[in-house]
Amino acid sequence: MRQVIEILRLKHEHHLSIREIARSCGLASSTVGDYLLRAEAAGLEWPLPEGVGEAQLQARLSAVAPPRTAQTPAPSVPDWAHLHVELRRPNLTLRLLWQEYIRTDPSGLKYSRFCERYQQWRKSLEPTLRQVHVPGEKMFVDWAGQSVPIRNGADGTTQPASLFVAALGASGKIFAEAFADQKLHSWISAHVHAFEFYGGVAALTIPDNTRTAVVDPCRYEPLLHRTYQEMAEHYGTVILPARVRKPRDKAKAESAVQVAQRQILAALRDMDFFSVGQLNQAIAPRLRQLNAQPFQKLDGSRDQWFEALDQPKLRPLPPSPFVVATWLEATVNIDYHVAVDHHYYSVPYGLIHQRLQVRLTDATVELFHKAKRVAAHQRSFQRGQFTTIEEHRPKSHQRYLQWTPSRIIDWARKIGPQCASVVQNVMAARPHPEQGFRSCLGIIRLARVHGEARLEAACQRALHFGTLSYRSIESILDKRLEAQPLQGDLACASPTHENVRGQDYFA
């Protein structure tokens, strides 16, 4: 259902064709068309009405069958040669020519098919197609192939820094910034900085099939990384990956990378950099110079073309920048906490044993169940500690599940009194007994591997030395220390010798 909502957004807000929506969402074109027909038959409007969740949306779409389209006569074929000559005139676009064509033949080709047929005809004239970009429509992004060494001042070793390059389709204005790596956080941050650099957002973002952007680089149905898709939704842009091994799909990015390497990186080749920040300080003035310099064969510069073409057509930036998030999955334990990065966060008690999706940022932890947020916490980096919201704790354990402190103690008592005493002390040492459930269950389950008799002896030894934890008891069993005599027995068995001072000497 989340993909259905995305399909409706791309159709009604961005007016994309079915094939473009299919490429962006990683679905078959027939599936996208079926969903749109069902939504139309169900009378769904965009934006969706208040209160319509995923369950209601699925019910409404499932209740109707997509209407069958009537057979229509074959559309008329435009005069491609005449259109080709018309496109040479200034300020004339293919969309305007299509609008004029559709007025004369309302049942003619749709815009996407019109463009596709024109491109096929033009390829028959020229072996290489020169793309015509609509202002504010596309931003091309890529990593430069050439890296820059960052030197470690302490030992002299170097680490390669990667250069991110973006370029707008109509003006060709270039953005470039160096990052320490090409991982997801750097990839998303680079896009955020590019949007801020341009002061707006292009309708389409065209990346390569890098792993941080496309999880499954299928030629026809590429699957986007979830965080990358989330960023696109935040900024209102559409991710449209280039086809695999088709560099002409992102010729602007390839050209911008080449220009950036020749005019920025080549000029810095003899300089040593000791941090990425220092490298970006050296890149900034050369980037301004690159965008301000006049074209060789055209009038104006990238900056002038940007102000005249792309800038007025860019979408506005959202009120706040996108925060990079990592998505994980976690299962709720019987103590109604989930483990995220070695810390435990509470969720409502009724979700015990449920599988949740976790959205993790540098500052927050959000937990979702069936696409609904059920808990949100400030992120903590204290390993092994608990973050608990009081509203998540049950008023009565019997009201929800059978797990109670007394039941766990009774279970441990079946192994022996020493084990029951350890379990009781573990829960008593926690602010809330439920926070000790996880450790107590681990102690009890050691009997499956080592036997109840050995576990009872290990618990006796742990009680004697005050080491009441799962790890301590597990260590005693692994090293077979439960069979060793305790401190009192050792004192009786110690030998008598003139070199042995005895415990009274140290009193």
Image (cartoon, helix red, strand yellow):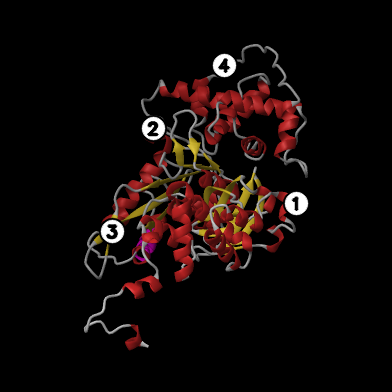
Instruction: Give the camera-side residue of 238 and 30.
Output: 30
* N-terminal label among 3 and 4: 4
Q: Mark 2 highlights which residue?
A: 246
State which quarter of the image contains the C terminus: bottom left
Which mark sits nearer the N-terminus, 3 or 2?
A: 3
* Residue 97 image position (x, y, % from top left): 58, 29
Q: Are marks 3 and 2 in contact (CB under 8 Å)?
A: no
Nearer the camera: disc 4 or disc 2: 2
Contact between labelled residues 4 and 1, with CB atoms less than 8 Å apart: no
Find disc 3 in the rendering and name its residue: 159
Q: Position of residue 465 (x, y in %)?
A: 44, 70
Q: Secondary structure at mark 2?
A: loop
Picture coordinates of residue 449, whole percent (x, y): 44, 47
The label number, if any, that marks residue 399 in the structure image: 1
For marks 3 and 4, give the CA distance.
57 Å
Image: magenta residue range: 280-289
Give the labeled residue for mark 4: 77
Name the element at disc 3. Answer: strand
The correct choice, above or below, for 426 with respect to 227 in the image is below
The residue that appears at 46% across and 21% down in the rendered structure is 121
For residue 245, the mark is: none
CB of mark 3 within 8 Å of CB of mark 4?
no
